[in-house]
Amino acid sequence: MSASLTKSFLPGVMPLKVEGDRLLLVDQRKLPLEFCYFDASEHEQMVFAIKDMVVRGAPSIGVAAAFGLAFEARRLAQELTRQELTRQELTKEELTRDKLQLGGLTFLRAFTQAKDDLDQTRPTAVNLRWATERMKKVVLAAIAAQVPLVQCAEQAYLEAEAILNEHLAANLAISNFGSELVKNGARLITHCNAGGLAACGYGTALGVIRAAHYQGKNISVYADETRPRNQGSKLTMWELAQDKIPSTLICDSMSGHLMSSGQIDMVITGADRIARNGDSANKIGTYNLAVLAHYHKIPFYIAAPLSTFDFDLIDGKNIPIEEREQNEVLTINGAPITVPDAQAYNPGFDVTPAQLIAGIITEVGVLRPDYSLSITKAIGLKN
Amino acid sequence: MSASLTKSFLPGVMPLKVEGDRLLLVDQRKLPLEFCYFDASEHEQMVFAIKDMVVRGAPSIGVAAAFGLAFEARRLAQELTRQELTRQELTKEELTRDKLQLGGLTFLRAFTQAKDDLDQTRPTAVNLRWATERMKKVVLAAIAAQVPLVQCAEQAYLEAEAILNEHLAANLAISNFGSELVKNGARLITHCNAGGLAACGYGTALGVIRAAHYQGKNISVYADETRPRNQGSKLTMWELAQDKIPSTLICDSMSGHLMSSGQIDMVITGADRIARNGDSANKIGTYNLAVLAHYHKIPFYIAAPLSTFDFDLIDGKNIPIEEREQNEVLTINGAPITVPDAQAYNPGFDVTPAQLIAGIITEVGVLRPDYSLSITKAIGLKN
């Protein structure tokens, strides 16, 4: 973590930690009733954790997957090196001396399989693949350079750390840029959780809120509960309480009434994938908020790191929308809330078209329409 | 119940029944897991039942309150008559012969108190006061005519029955008028419950859906779950299942995504109070749906009997919006869904302005803008 991270801000919230040889995820399914960790040191556990939303939020999924691959690379390196040492009857000293790369292809095959497993866990967030591609690139380069496996794994681990640190820094930059848009005494609505749990550290949309709060802007926040999984009531309300930011929980159906009665000045959410024209996928319900904000002439902002942009997509039409288990809608806390054999529809995300978005807050500044131009410029700045 | 009710339609669902000397409400808090009755024969029980939403839905509240007052009138008449008989040492035969009205003022005072108690249970639905005013008018007239108390009570009971029967007939008329607006194969969204449970018999918005279904129009319905109390998942899905109408449960946040992806042809809800200009209060979340429908150029209809119109209000600005217990938002099935000491906002209703409403389906036909004119005309037709 760079020194600047703690200089002017509190560190926010981390969705994961490394403790010795264990990779631990904050179990976001259990908050706020219980704060505990889920051991995702094993590859299968990490795949399960992302699918089951132990860890969620596009940037955090990317960071978690990167660390997962780093851990898997370590395990593979140790196992294959041990096998090769046995087979070739070499000592570990000889191996290091000769910089001999043992089992490189087997390593690469297994690593790529692990990456593919992770890529298939959640289809909508693009940060996941963005992070795993970066990890693969590092490993491929190391293998190509005939670096010993244990060292390959070490490079993978450093890359995961870099991805995390970049997100922490990006979130602080987003928070600073975004806070300039927040007026004194502003009353905001946010949807789902785009805080530290979702994006590491300060968070994205919640980072903007945190920064405005610590700048003494006297803001207050309405948190959409965000059915069906209630990330708003469970996670966002928890993060806001940690920082003592004035907050009020609402049902997703109440935003229009708040807006029409003049109680809202700004709406801000995160994003899971942003197309080249600015169309943005985010947690289901975001689009409702955006249309309502538009109708009431209230600015609707998105806060997201550049890792969320999918430059391969011209617009939002082709963003894959994950359809999740009907049970998430049919039950609450495991208990049925409707008739037996009922059908439910459970899209995990929706797409907000660019024309409803007042600005996209990134680590290189606030992008404004025409997004085709501003996004191209921003990606250029970053690269 | 008039003969015409069962002629061309199934009877739908009743929210209450009278069994001997007991007034029983379907306990709508327990559906769909359990179908049971709540004994509201006693006045205090009826007050509690309306407050706690054992019975809910503007027209059903009105009907239940009317029967509650009829039962209270009976109890008062019996008690006071007994007291007077004892005091004056008259026989029951003498009383009847002389058509003597005993304890009339005491009766009127207690009856009015009971009416006031009921009026204060729920502030938004106007049908409640509309029904209790009708009951009071009948009782006042009977007392003024020096009718014996037992007979006053009987007249009150007949008035409650008349109110119920008028609603049953109105709902069938609404259903028929409304079904003409539903296209073959239409996919509809409805919010909360505007079925038989809410309005007796066929229901209002669900009545239109029932009629279209039984006309073989091959429709399908998306039911908003309707947080925080989930009347959509619990009651509407139950009514739709009773009639085997193809239905899908959605979270309130999913309507925009369904509309933008071309999966919705029509939105229809009930109403709790309609001002003279057509502004309509209904369950919180209705306004979100109306704005979204407007944005997607999908017709948004309201179905409600004329008893829902409040001719004293020029527009929706002065419709009182009931603010309910924060706990309804902070907990689900009794279990907390957020941090301890969290604040929540819980308006029970919102107001949809007339300009977002394509038509208001009543028992005298479909009212269209300009509502100031069409509503005045409709009320004239009825009176």
Image: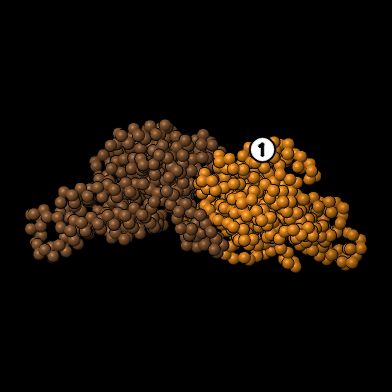
Chain colours: A orange, B brown
Per the image, label 1 sits on a secondary structure element best described as: loop
User: In the image, residue B296 lies at what x, y percent?
Assistant: 53, 36
- Image quadrant where one finds the N terminus of chain A: bottom right
The residue under label 1 is A315
Q: Is residue A60 above or below residue B271?
A: below
Does B102 sit left or right of B118 as displayed?
left
Determine the residue positioned at 72% across, 47% down: A362
Determine the residue positioned at 44% across, 49% down: B321
User: In the image, residue A345 lies at what x, y percent?
Assistant: 52, 47
The one nearer the camera, B166 or B14, is: B166
In this orientation, does residue B205 appear? no
User: In the image, residue B65 lies at what x, y percent?
Assistant: 31, 52
In this orientation, does residue B350 appear? yes
Determine the residue positioned at 68% across, 60% down: A13
Does B219 sit left or right of A179 as displayed?
left
Q: Residue furthest right?
A: A97
Q: Quadrant of residue A104?
A: bottom right
Q: Is residue A201 above or below residue A280?
A: below
Does A67 sit left or right of A252 as displayed?
right
- Image quadrant where one finds the C terminus of chain A: top right
User: In the image, residue B381 lies at what x, y percent?
Assistant: 30, 34
Q: Quadrant of residue B372?
A: top left
Determine the residue positioned at 8% across, 54% down: B98
The one nearer the camera, B274 or B243, is: B274
Q: Is residue B100 above or below residue A294?
A: below
Three-letter code for the amino acid on which mark 1 is drawn: Asp
The one nearer the camera, A312 or A217, is: A217
